[in-house]
Image: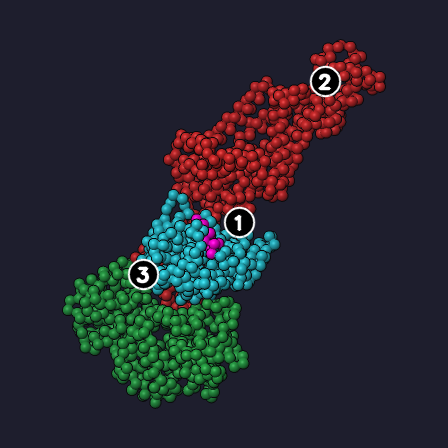
Amino acid sequence: MQPFILATIALGICLAGTLWRIGRWFWSDIGPESLSLPTKRRMRAARQTLWRVFSGRRLFKVVGAFQWEVLLLGHLLRRHPLRWAAHMLIGYGLLTLILFHALDDWITPLVFSDYEPTLNPFRWLRNLLGALVLMGVLATVVRHFRQAGEAFRTPGDRLLLVLIVVVVLSGVLLESARILSPAVFDAMVEDYMGDDDPEAVAALQAYWAAEFGAWRARSGTGFSGEQIKTGASIHETFCAACHDRPQSAFLSYPLSRLMKPLMAVAGDHRLNQWLWNVHFWATCLALACLPFSKLFHFIATPISIMVRAAGPAAAHPALQPVRRALALDACTHCGMCSQHCSVAPIYKVLGNPNILPAEKLKGIKRFQTHRKQSLPKATLVEGSFICTLCGRCTQWCPSGIDLQDLWQASRKDMIQSGAAPLRRRSAPPLQTALVPPAPASLGLSDRPETFWACVQCTTCTSVCPVVAVSEDPQRDLGLTPQQIMNLMRLQLKEQAMDSRMLWDCVTCYKCQEHCPQDVKVADVLYELRNEAWHRGARSDQRAANQPPHGSSF
Amino acid sequence: MQTAYLYFPGCKLSPFLSQYDTSTRAVLDAFGIQLDDTELNCCGYPVRHQSLRASVLAAARNLAIADRMGLPVLIPCQCCYGNLKQAAYWLAQNAELCDFVNGELAAEGLRWHAGIAVRHLLSVLAEDIGIERVQARVSRPLHALPVAVHYGCHALRPGHVVQLDNPLAPTIFENLMSALGAAPVEWPLRLECCGHPVRDNNPPLAAKLMNQKCEDARAAGARILVTACTYCQMQFAGISETPGHPEQAGDLPAILVSQLLGWAMGLPDDRLGDEVQSLGALL
Amino acid sequence: MTAVGSDIHCDLLVIGTGMAGMAAALFAAQRGIDTVQVGMTGEINFASGLLDLLGVHPVGSSRTWPNPWDGIARLIRAHPRHPYALIGAESIRASMDIFVAFLNEAGMPYIRHPEKNVQVITPLGTVKTTYALPETMAAGAPALKVGTPCLLADFPGLKGFSARQIKNTLQERWPAMQTVRLPFPGLRGELQTERMARRLETPQAREQLGKSIRQNLGGARVVGLPAVLGVSRTREVWTDMCETVGVPIFEIPTMLPGITGVRLRECFERNLPRLGIRARYQQKILPAPRLSGGAFIAPVGGETVEAQIRAQAVILASGRFFGQGLHADRHAIRETIFNLPVYQPAARVNWHRKTLFNDRGHPIHRAGLAVDSRMRPCDEQGRYIYPNLFAAGSILAHQDWIRQKCGSGLAIASAYAAVRAACRSVQSQTPSTQEA
């Protein structure tokens, strides 16, 4: 296929994909109010916001954010130098290569009037940029192994990283192949020398073999010094204007030395062509994949950062769903939020990764895409409601995401779709046969000694504010505190757990404080709730076909 | 006098009740107390319904950090205070729990042990700073304003765990109010729960509990309710965590202890919060 | 509250917050002794509110005493080891006078005739002899005596209080009694006294109830209700309702859990600190107190030691079995704090008689701390264990307060005697004058 057509198709896919993803920001429904905000209204809100930003004082903040956070990634520089380095290397390396190498027919001559790709410093620069990009990739991979759980998690993301490496390496090797290639040499001679004199050609060959590392399959003797001298002067006449010595290509040249044996085996022309195809196809594939991969954050995150900088100017209520969808794309999974999450120690015990913001965001993303089909996963719901909405993740997010707003909205969505955290339901039905005993808690409720001293004086019920305020405790609560203690005393835990009192308890500890016999009434009620959650969590996990996490008391 | 504390704001303070934060800082600053703002984690109170172990680990981490810094912890929220004290209590009682917690904390080079000081704001004001010092700084006495002090639950009970004051007949809050020149009323429901813990689960129950308290305070002659807890104030003032989902406020104005104290000390209104605006009219 | 871990110095440590403990703290405060009181919620919450002085003697007979002092005199002669014998009628009288005066001042007026017992009805319809009544119960005594036409109201859902049962039991004694069952305003299902009492503290609820009682009044000139007229605002609730109903109302103590004991407890908790008592409620004395230089050093706290109290004298009013002052296991009864010798039957097999409801009671009821004339726990030979440790209340031996109907008197009088003796002990140890 014509390279030009292929490139156009790839670019087209890239643009279309980008537009689709940006469009998704305008028709995704995150947060219950988004159901009453049609796309048109959101777009209008976006237009109004743009106008407000550009015509107001906030513009300075936005421009400042663009310069410091987007162009210079200043917020990363201070805290995460390795990440900053990787971003700069890959980002600017690729950008420069795209602009000045891939598009060197159009852009580069505007800047350098006598540009030829085979001249220095361009040979050196190309290799340098390639090397920088590879260093950036290496830094990313090193970081990934050092800090598990972040960076390129999905196969799609890894694919793109691999593609970048392939593009750069194939480019480097292509250059090596071209340094060696006799076919390219011959074609150039035909185009530019026009002289059919075989001796002159041979002399030029000799010079090029000696000075430019060109290769040729030959039998018989090598070149003579005379030939080389003659070749030098021919080179001066015909070639030197566009060709500098390739040794400045500090990656490609040494590699070309290593490739010499391959030339005989692979057949020169095929190797070149093959490498060029790989280089070109990989580039096109990468381009086409870009909007569907993590690298889309290249577009989304700067927008998110600038929207944050716009502050109140970007607070249009109809824009909120747009900002949330933008947030889901702008997240780079840097994991900064999880590092500073207030409830991270709870994750260590309960083992539900959805407690941590970075994972929770991914879970919300998945829930968003499959919303119409299913309930959100129970673990996502539990994790969402363990979050205390402290807002710290929002403060630390380098991508400008208002995480707290996202959590608030997604919680509402979850409740509306029928999922509710365990505490908002009554205790789930018992399945003793299937549920192994809970790991050791304090074990108050299972030890008879806890209840020995209970004489059923009903003081706990008497002082309970929840009982006091109910007009009909049996109807509203099922069992009163002293009835629950009685059942526990008789080791009838199951009956005790089947009451609304367990979930309406306000944990005021009056019962325990006033008990004349020191029975730990409130602590026992807490423990029964723990038990109910443990059973409910396990049954939800079974239903979701997931292996239980390390949930323990 | 202890002049430096590790400040434990709790998860709800800055996002939902920032006036408690600013007024507390303003008041403590006026007494020359320095607050360290090292990043801490959730106290573990909300998750105790699901897992005591998670709750205790979360609390213990904060205590271990305080220990590493050699500072007592100062807490404005009573639920946070209660949970940190509960965690310390259970860790001292249960060796297996203690081993588990210290095993987890060791990964960060932290360690919990007994004896780490945890102080609620009320204790710091009434005891560490002292009633006399507080009284000496009052420049705008409250002219016998009848106030109903709300003690809340989790800093008060179980008494032997949380050790704030006498759980059946506490006086610390009233003493503080008297020092400001207010007239704390005797109201029978003063030690009852405000209802916030069941706000999500059972909104009518939470509202009933709160309204009953407001009625009782009014019947006792109070014109304002004073709280010393993030959650309690949010309950009485009808402050919601969910935007667009307002909660009903009680029919008695509610104010935080730090706001009232700050106003009595003559601190500027903008550091105290909107609630102090109504004080002028009440006096 | 003092800072954790510190030492607390005082002249007198009162261990116990029941009737005896509260009375002891009261008497000590009035004498100006620097006193710390420590105790957990225990038996006092279940008090009926009636103050018994002496109702029955001898135990096992049905002999009740219209004049308690006659009965006390007889009792002292018959049982010289009974605490009343050690205390003496004069002191008993003085203690009751002071105690009742305090309650009156504290806004919980008690009605009594200094020389006479009265009879009141119980929730079962039996008749009980007692000495002093809260004013909210006072109208019941003359009404019973005279047989005033009475309306007795009960509420569906309140267990242990049936107006019809009371009427049936009292038929002959009080023929002019009518009963009615009324719905309780705003509450349904099973009722508890504290909920009902708090409810009646709101004007609307009591207006509603008052009206419905009034509608059923008929010819009644007095109304009897279970004791649910408020916990903290009892006076207000009672006077309000009497006005609405139009005739006097008398409360009848309820079965457990009642709020009559809670009223007393709250009254003490409010007022004793005001009198200067340093109260540490919901704390206990932990093992093990010891003597040091003649003073007691007692660790105190909820479950772990929070402070050490150093006291010149100690009054042990820690209650009986329910209050955990005494503990019975399969072998013996022991005193839980100081491990004092406990007067008890020789072996466990002798603790109880063979019939549960034996009129004479059981020997275990007479077990407890035997004391000397100065209320100091002593051994079998009558020698005191510690010169500055005193005991008061239901922990004492040689009394059966349930059957003798002398519980309050025992608590208050023994507390009075103990405080007097403790004062002397403190003063003899520290010759410098105490501040009044």
Question: Residue A99: image x %, image y %?
Answer: 61, 25
> The disc labelled 2 sits on which kind of residue?
Ala
> Does label 2 lie on the same chain as label 1?
yes
Between marks 3 and 1, how big is the CA–CA gap?
A: 46 Å
Q: Nearer the viewer, residue C285 or A487?
A: C285
Q: Nearer the viewer, residue B249 or B108?
A: B249
Between marks 3 and 2, how big is the CA–CA gap?
A: 100 Å
Q: Which residue is mark 1?
A: A344
Question: Residue A369: image x %, image y %?
Answer: 46, 35
Image quadrant in which you'd find residue C82: bottom left
* Chain C image colour: green
Q: How is the image coloured?
A: by chain
* Chain B image colour: cyan
Marked residue chain, label 1:
A
> The disc labelled 3 sits on which kind of residue?
Gly
Q: Judge whether C372 appears above or below A426 on screen.
A: below
Residue A241 is tagged as: 2
Q: Is B65 placed left or right of C44 in the picture?
A: right
Q: Nearer the viewer, mark 1 or mark 2?
A: 2
| Chain coloured red | A
Q: Judge whether C288 appears above or below B88 on screen.
A: below
Q: Secondary structure at mark 1?
A: helix
- Which residues fall within the magenta stretch? B16-27
> The disc labelled 1 sits on which kind of residue?
Ala
Q: Nearer the viewer, mark 3 or mark 2?
A: 3
